């Protein structure tokens, strides 16, 4: 029997000492429970992804210096951990095999992902050798993340007689990713007739979130043990080939997964970047209500401030709901009317424009006044402004530059509006009371920048819009392909036109947490100057 520990840790990119201390702490924990092997995630020593820190030679040297410190802590145990190896003038995404206080071997990642959010070929050279080991009568090999997603790698291992395979990963989360991983690991286990020990990071890193969900998969392809999702965990597993392990089902619910990912991503962004409090423009609408609720849950209500900024167009119901949301959450809030500021702007500007009304300019001025007030609070108190725009609005440019697009972090930037509604209902179920008023959930969405305004004046209904955005943005469907899906051709042209013409806006917006398979930003890099039609 072999005792294997999976150390699912939350690292911080660039804080090598912090990461090393956490690794050493988990090595000692593994020793205390008599584990034979302890396994850490990919690049756990540097944090993932280190991006252009990898271009700094002193960063690489610091990572190697701390590896030597960790080596000394491995007397009586095997530790497998991710680090950056250097050979001649090349660097490698590597796994250190540490045993009895020494570095015994290094496995270098063979398949370097270079799609979506990954650009490992920019930095690393690929390895070219498989690493096989024997311990206590068990034969096993080590792999790193993308390796086991490639058919060539799986085929090469299927010819070997192995008892288990170790895969250290830094696999970013998106909806559906956990199920996809299970299928990949199950295929690997069945094809090689070997157990699989998979260890992933958890935590937020800029727009990426890592969910953890480290797992053990039996040689028959069953998940037989799994660590917590979106939390640090230490999973101990006793490997015995003669034992028939029961399958462990990992429950996956879209709104619960999204909520957990967003909360974790927000918490880590705020804490790792040294912010203490956040401020949110609470309008009484569904988006700001969800952001406020998640911020209070993630950061503590004492660290969340609301700013309610009504205008002449704000309805009594919306204004009442804005106050109610803050009171339900127990967060401090202030009310600042923007009418006087708006009147001053219009008094100065309208004579210059040679007209008597503000039209679209007046609408955008309101959004920019609110943005300026939020940024003033940020400057005065050091609060981080949380942007409340969702993916549906950001996709179509239904937002104002330097207005409702301001903020240091866009919590809902990759969350479609229809999913925002699902999350709002989940929040109420979670709290077991009406934290977000039902009136907020049921009210037709509106920016309330002019009389009787509704989102549907400009956009298709969200249940129609969101599937089009998914197919066009995430799946690269053409206009003709969308028509074959049953969507109206005129409507598709309108939506695609809004998406394509708004790239310049998105480039100037805050970063936000990736939760869909393809988010704007590093995941989808479209040229701003672009004349390709549909």
Image (tube, rainbow, N blue to C red):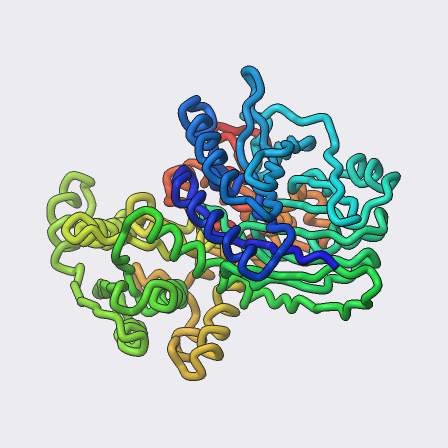
Quadrant position of residue 447 = bottom left
Q: Residue at x 28, y 72 (%)?
A: 326
Picture quarter with the N terminus: bottom right
Instruction: Indicate whether 475 appears above or below 296.
Output: above
Picture quarter with the C terminus: top right
Q: Residue at x 18, y 41 (%)?
A: 354
Instruction: Indicate whether 129 appears above or below 188.
Output: above
**Which x, y percent locates residue 157?**
82, 39
**Which x, y percent locates residue 99?**
61, 41
**Which x, y percent locates residue 55?**
45, 23
Give the left or right position of residue 311, taking residue 98 as reference: left
Which residue is more in the foreground, 249 or 500? Answer: 249
Give the left or right position of residue 487, taking residue 120 as reference: right
Give the left or right position of residue 86, taking residue 320 as reference: right
Q: Is residue 228 in view? A: yes
**Which x, y percent locates residue 481?**
71, 45
Instruction: Indicate whether 238 appears above or below 61.
Output: below
Which residue is more in the foreground, 512 or 133? Answer: 133
């Amino acid at each position: 029997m072999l005792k294997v520990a999976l150390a699912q840790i939350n690292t911080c990119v660039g804080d090598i000492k912090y990461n090393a201390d956490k690794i050493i702490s988990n090595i000692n924990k593994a020793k205390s429970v008599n584990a034979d092997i302890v396994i850490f995630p990919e690049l756990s020593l540097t944090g993932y992804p280190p991006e252009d820190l990898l271009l700094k030679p002193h960063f690489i040297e610091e990572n190697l210096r701390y590896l030597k410190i960790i080596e000394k802590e491995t007397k009586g145990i095997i530790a497998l951990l991710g680090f950056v190896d250097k050979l001649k003038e090349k660097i490698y995404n590597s796994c250190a095999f540490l045993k009895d206080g020494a570095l015994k071997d290094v496995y270098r990642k063979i398949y370097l992902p270079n799609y979506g959010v990954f650009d490992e070929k920019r930095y690393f050279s690929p390895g070219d050798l498989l690493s096989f080991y024997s311990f206590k009568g068990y034969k096993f090999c080590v792999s790193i993340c993308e390796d086991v997603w490639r058919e060539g790698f799986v085929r090469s291992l299927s010819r070997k007689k192995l008892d288990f395979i170790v895969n250290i990963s830094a696999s970013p989360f998106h909806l559906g990713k956990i199920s996809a991983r299970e299928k990949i690991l199950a295929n690997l286990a069945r094809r090689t007739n070997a157990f699989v020990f998979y260890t992933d990071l958890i935590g937020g890193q800029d727009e990426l979130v890592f969910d953890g969900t480290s797992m053990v998969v039996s040689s028959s392809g069953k998940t037989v043990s799994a660590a917590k999702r979106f939390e640090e965990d230490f999973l101990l597993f006793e490997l015995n080939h003669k034992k028939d392990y029961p399958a462990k089902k990992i429950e996956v619910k879209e709104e619960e997964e999204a909520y957990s990912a967003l909360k974790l991503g927000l918490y880590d962004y705020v804490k790792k970047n040294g912010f203490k409090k956040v401020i949110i423009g609470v309008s009484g609408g569904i988006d700001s209500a969800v952001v406020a609720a998640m911020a209070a849950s993630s950061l503590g209500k004492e660290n969340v401030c609301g700013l309610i900024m009504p205008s002449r167009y704000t309805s009594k119901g919306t204004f009442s709901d804005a106050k109610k949301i803050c009171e339900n959450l127990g967060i401090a809030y202030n009310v600042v009317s923007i009418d006087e500021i708006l009147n001053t702007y219009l008094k100065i500007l309208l004579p210059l424009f040679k007209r008597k009304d503000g039209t679209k300019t007046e609408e955008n001025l309101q959004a920019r006044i609110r943005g300026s007030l939020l940024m003033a609070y940020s400057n005065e108190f050091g609060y981080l402004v949380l942007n409340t725009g969702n993916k549906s609005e950001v996709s179509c440019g239904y937002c104002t530059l330097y207005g409702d697009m301001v903020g240091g972090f866009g919590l809902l930037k990759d969350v479609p509006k229809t999913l925002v509604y699902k999350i709002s209902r989940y929040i109420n179920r979670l709290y077991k009371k009406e934290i977000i008023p039902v009136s907020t959930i049921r009210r037709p969405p509106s920016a309330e920048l002019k009389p009787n305004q509704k989102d549907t004046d400009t956009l298709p209904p969200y249940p129609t819009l969101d599937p089009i955005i998914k197919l066009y943005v995430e799946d690269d469907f053409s206009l003709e392909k969308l028509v074959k899906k049953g969507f109206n051709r005129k409507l598709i042209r309108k939506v695609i036109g809004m998406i394509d013409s708004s790239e310049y806006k998105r480039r100037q917006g805050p970063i936000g947490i990736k939760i869909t398979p393809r988010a704007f930003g590093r995941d989808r890099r479209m040229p701003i100057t672009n004349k390709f039609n549909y």
